Amino acid sequence: MTVRFSTPRGSLVAWPAAFGRRFVVTIDTEEEFDWSLPGASDDYDVSAVAALPAMHRRLAARGVSPIYLVDYVIAASAPASAVLRDILASDPATEIGAQLHSWVTPPFGAANAPVETFAGSLPREMEAAKLDRLVAMIERAFSRRPRVYRAGRYGVGPHTIAALATRGFRADASMRARFDYSRKGGPDFTAVEPGAFQLDVPTMIELPLSTIYTGVLRRHGAHLHPLLGRVPRARGLFARTCLLSRVPLTPEGTPVREAVRAIEVASQAGERLLQLSFHSPSLVPGHTPYVRTPRDLERFHAWWDEVIEALHARGYAPASLQQVLDASDEARAVGPAGLEPAT
């Protein structure tokens, strides 16, 4: 059963004027694994974490205090968690959040049971048990309780938000706006807009990963882009002819020119908060499909230089998670998160 999420009318966070335009950077801080077959092997490593301090310094020089969404393997690794503790000590505004990779987080099912990589598709009790183990390991490693959550593979489910609320989380960052993972067994976020919105739990907000429609037909993107997906190569044709593109704000697969254009469109549309993201293994060539060579890594770093400059030019300033939460507490937002099980 596919779970479809949407941004309900009236639920967008009404940011205070003093908040201005802001952006946050989230880093999926995780082990290296085979992206084509998640959960198929326990042959993973955490060596790429060693590249995080240099990247943190690059971002900090631009005023950015990232949110590190840490999974169980990273928190349980003494060397990896030590690297992150040093980063936290150097930058108090940095935040440690939780990222649930269900295939590496205990408890596990029967030895021969199929691996469910979308945590939100697990039975309610199993998802909650894994979440508890993850939170406990993060508290043990970093002496702090996470306040923001991301489901690995964006696999948030019908019981996830309630489970997070009862464990003191203030924000979910699992929904990848405008993307649909239902064909892979995951959720559908086609109707999720880029803006942060109030969840049906009063203490929590959703911080969607920013995806912006660009092109001549961008105002029709929410309706047209899903339809184009039904026609072979139609999306590529519309993107190449500048009619319609779906642009996620990440250096992983998004050319810098498209990202800069998307920021311009977002600013014109009045988007007040943008979320940019990447996966920590991309900091070392060979671990993700996006950074295979040293040249790819150079382009990765250059992407951030140009994109952050574009953000500043459009009036977007970096924000810490605490600043976002403080501003959301001031804001007035009504309406529950839309959630519709497919039939």
Image (cartoon, helix red, strand yellow):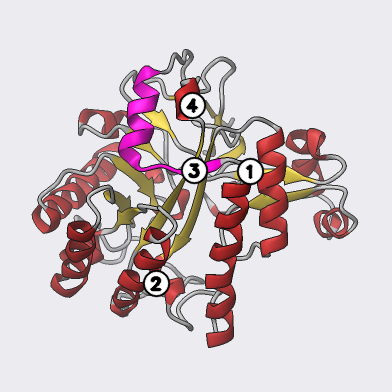
Q: Are marks 2 and 4 in contact (CB under 8 Å)?
A: no
Confirm whether residue 117 shows in the render.
Answer: no
Q: Which mark is residue 314?
A: 1
Amino acid at pointer 3: Ala
Residue 186, image x, y percentages? 51, 48
Outermost residue, right direction?
241
Residue at 26 percent of width and 34 percent of height: 169
Mark 4: which amino acid? Phe
Which of the two labelled residues, at mark 2 and mark 3, occupies the earlier sequence position? 2
Above or below, 215 against 303 in this view is above
Q: In the figure, is residue 241 to the left or right of 130? A: right
Q: Nearer the viewer, residue 71 or 156?
A: 71
User: Which label number is shown at residue 40?
Assistant: 2
Amino acid type assigned to the residue bearing label 1 in the image: Arg
In three-dimensional space, the C-alpha distance between marks 2 and 3, rounded to whole angstroms, equals 41 Å
Q: Image point 30% across, 75% down: which residue? A: 42
The alpha-carbon separation of the residues under discs 4 and 1 comes to: 22 Å
Does residue 251 belong to the magenta stretch? no
Comes first in the chain, label 4 or label 3: 4
Q: CA distance from mark 4 to mark 3?
A: 20 Å
Q: Residues within 10 Å of mark 1 (few under 14, many from 20)?
A: some
Residue that badge 4 annotates: 197
Please tell me in which quadrant of the rendered image residue 323 appears.
top left
Do the CB atoms of the residues marked 1 and 2 lie less than 8 Å apart? no
The answer to whether 288 is drawn above or below residue 140 in the figure is below
Tag 2's secondary structure?
Answer: loop
- Tell me whether the residue at label 4 lies in contact with that at label 3, contact meaning CB atoms closer than 8 angstroms: no
